[in-house]
Amino acid sequence: MTEPSSANGTAQTRIAATFARCRAEGRAALVTYVMAGDPDPETSLKVLEALPEAGADIVEFGLPFTDPMADGPAIQAAGLRALKGGQGVARTLDLVRRFRERNAGTPVILMGYFNPIHTYGVERFLDDAVAAGIDGLIVVDLPPEEDDELCLPALAKGLAFIRLATPTTDEKRLPAVLANTAGFVYYVSITGITGTATPDFGKVADAVGRIRRHTSLPVVVGFGVRTGADAAAIARGADGVVVGSALIDALRGSLDGEDRAQAGTVEAVSALVRDLAAGVRRAAKA
């Protein structure tokens, strides 16, 4: 059984406390993903602040990158909007720092790719991430064989390093994937890129059960969840539900013809989060 790293700090404690609260309420956690700096830094901060108010338990904050190989068109476009506005590592960490001025309890997971972190400098990045109030990292292009690059240094700083498992992660590979994972395990419910298909909910539940036989960490499920009904279906068999592309689409649909935020941009995202949160809570009562 894989246990959380002994290098737990405030960050990992915040993640664990959130899952404990959700378990006490008899429900899965709602994990929401948005892109940092999309469509502009100030609107991005308002969206980030609105997510917990609308019912999100954990927030994943995307770090923009020019070559997001695992992401579908919606998140790719969000990253390009953010990069066009000058969003980078330093500005992303600053948004989290400003978020922490008003919200000390909601876990924030930074999700992205290694290149911007490497360019920024790993040690500098980890120190600044801890200072900003980041709880954990999901870096999709670093396999377990490269744990020395970022995973182990992150754990040593008290940050959770959250690994992805997929439908193609077999019994032989799974122990390696879970070896240094902390916080939770992110199960990718479909093969391919984000936002492009709907998962088979029955197969997802079976996969979650298989992963649970190897770890005591919470297992959350993402990719392909778009509605409250989808969230409810996943929540019945998982410890958490992740929604990203649908929220990005809601935000994009609220922008004007030049990709600028409008009066209803934050509410467009919040409304969908409320529906997703209601779905998760319906599943708890079922």
Image: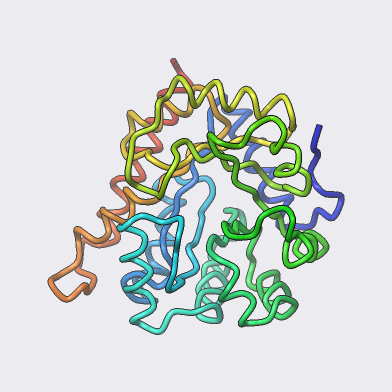
Q: Residue at x 31, y 57 (%)?
A: 74
**Quarter placement of the N terminus:** top right
Q: Residue at x 40, y 37 (%)?
A: 277
- Residue 231 image-quadrant placement: top left
Residue 149 position in % (x across, y down): 74, 67
Q: Residue at x 61, y 37 (%)?
A: 169
Q: What colouring method underlies this structural image?
A: rainbow
Q: Residue at x 21, y 61 (%)?
A: 264
Is residue 68 or residue 107 the one in the foreground?
A: 68
Height in image: 149 above or below 167?
Answer: below
Residue 19 position in % (x across, y down): 63, 38
Height in image: 89 above or below 234?
Answer: below
Residue 228 position in % (x across, y down): 33, 33
- Residue 213 image-quadrant placement: top right
Number of dots carrying numbers: 0
**Quarter placement of the C terminus:** top left
Residue 207 position in % (x across, y down): 57, 26
- Residue 125 image-quadrant placement: bottom right
Q: Is residue 79 left or right of residue 239?
A: left
